[in-house]
Image (cartoon, rainbow, N blue to C red):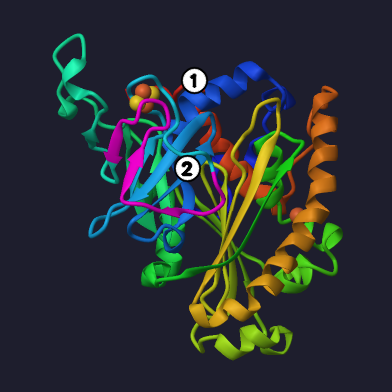
């Protein structure tokens, strides 16, 4: 897709009502979220023979890694009477079987029912085969486990189209979790996502943090694909931090910031480290902020320092996005879009298409 003169670059911003309506949030859950894959955990945090329960949107998830097989994702509900098999936790637990705490139905990590208490005494015919856990599609990409919550998601390579084009095989370099952070923001996810796509505010709002990393605005390079977009900024050797300089490859010289649906951002440094940022919506107009910092095991000593650098500019953003949400809630009509806000417009055009906010173009005569 061309960088300028395209329809998305001439759009107005989405109207404020879309950022405060519970009906719109419900429609996003039905139409928008199921179209995409959702990053849920680093693969290295779910070793073979372990399971992890967590929440994604309104769904309780159970991630399992059966020995010798790929990781699996299930709904964390026992098919007998709906009880969760494991409580949500920060870390995976080692296990061979999952035993329901209510009546003891026992599953393997492939989701098959292996035993039920007093199995010969059900009131009707009973076969273990008929009662597996409900599975969701899952995939591994960029050392993360991704889950689809609808029956017909866009292929993950398409969702990450520009990421795949720019990073190529290096996306698949095995990485471990160096550090992570999670918190809640008092704003609609679109305010947080727009803000992270906003290349107009960085020099003003982050003069001593992100702006130092990204450098002069005149050197910004943008790219737009069908689904993802990119801001690339040069990394100059004198500006590199000590650990970055120690592990940088000669070929890669840019810091890449991708925006992709549904609400994710991927930051890639020349030294091979990646940060995945996600803003899944929560109830009552809030959203979660999740950050996973991934890299080579040799970068572990720097993980905490790097995540604190990310936290510094994300906390600067918190005050701004929560204030912008109050502005949007007041019934504001958003002002004109700047050239450095085209990544926002690019994503909003995709959102409008999936949410069916506009009539489809007329069919060719
Ligand atoms: S709800 Fe799990 S065994 Fe009854
Ligand atoms: Fe920001």
**Is 223 located above or below residue 122 in the figure?**
below
Residue 75 on the magenta segment: no
The image quarter containing residue 111 is top left
Local SS, label 1: loop
Of 55 and 290, the residue lying toward us? 55
Residue 305 % position (x, y): 71, 74
Residue 177 % position (x, y): 53, 66
The image quarter containing residue 206 is bottom right
Magenta stretch, residue numbers: 89-107
- Residue at 34% x, 31% y: name it: 104
Of 6 and 55, the residue lying toward us? 55
> Is the magenta region chiefly helix, strand or loop?
loop
Say whether marks 2 and 1 touch (CB < 8 Å). no
Q: Is residue 46 left or right of residue 262?
A: left
Tell me the quadrant of ligand 2.
Answer: bottom right
Residue at the disc numbered 2: 53
Residue 32 % position (x, y): 49, 30
Q: Residue 363, can we see it?
A: no
Q: Is residue 192 left or right of residue 275?
A: right
Q: Mark 2 or 1 closer to N-term?
A: 2
Residue 99 on the magenta segment: yes
Residue at the disc numbered 1: 359
- Residue at 46% x, 39% y: name it: 86
Which one is in front in this view, the residue at disc 2 or the one at disc 1? Answer: 2
């Amino acid at each position: 897709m061309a960088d300028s003169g395209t329809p998305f670059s001439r759009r107005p911003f989405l109207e404020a009502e879309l950022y405060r309506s519970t009906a719109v949030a419900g429609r996003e859950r039905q139409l928008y979220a199921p179209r995409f894959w959702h990053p849920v955990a680093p693969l290295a945090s779910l070793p073979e023979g372990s399971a992890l329960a967590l929440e994604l949107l309104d769904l309780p998830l159970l991630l399992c890694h059966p020995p010798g097989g790929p990781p699996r994702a299930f709904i964390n509900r026992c098919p007998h009477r709906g009880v969760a098999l494991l409580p949500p936790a920060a870390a995976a637990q080692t296990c061979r079987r999952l035993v329901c705490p209510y009546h003891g139905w026992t599953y393997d990590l492939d989701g098959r029912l292996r035993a039920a208490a007093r199995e010969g005494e059900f009131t009707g015919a009973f076969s273990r085969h008929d009662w597996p856990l409900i599975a969701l599609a899952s995939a591994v990409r960029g050392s993360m486990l991704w889950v689809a919550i609808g029956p017909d998601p866009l292929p993950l390579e398409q969702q990450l189209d520009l990421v795949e084009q720019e990073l190529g095989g290096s996306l698949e370099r095995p990485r471990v979790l160096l550090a992570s952070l999670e918190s809640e923001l008092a704003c609609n996810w679109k305010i947080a996502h727009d803000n992270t796509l906003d290349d107009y505010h960085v020099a003003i709002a982050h003069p001593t943090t992100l702006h130092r990393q990204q450098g002069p605005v005149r050197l910004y390079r943008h790219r737009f694909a069908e689904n993802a977009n990119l801001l690339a900024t040069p990394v100059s050797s004198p500006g590199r931090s000590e650990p970055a300089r120690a592990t940088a490859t000669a070929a890669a010289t840019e810091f890449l910031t991708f925006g992709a649906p549904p609400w994710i951002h991927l930051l890639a440094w020349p030294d091979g480290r990646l940060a995945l940022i996600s803003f899944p919506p929560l109830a009552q107009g809030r959203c979660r902020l999740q950050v996973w910092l991934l890299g080579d095991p040799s970068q572990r000593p720097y993980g905490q320092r790097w995540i604190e650098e990310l936290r510094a500019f994300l906390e600067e953003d918190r005050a701004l996005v929560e204030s912008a949400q109050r502005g949007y809630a007041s019934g504001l009509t958003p002002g004109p879009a700047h050239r450095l806000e085209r990544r926002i417009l690019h994503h909003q055009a995709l959102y409008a298409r999936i949410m069916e906010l506009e009539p489809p173009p007329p069919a060719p005569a």
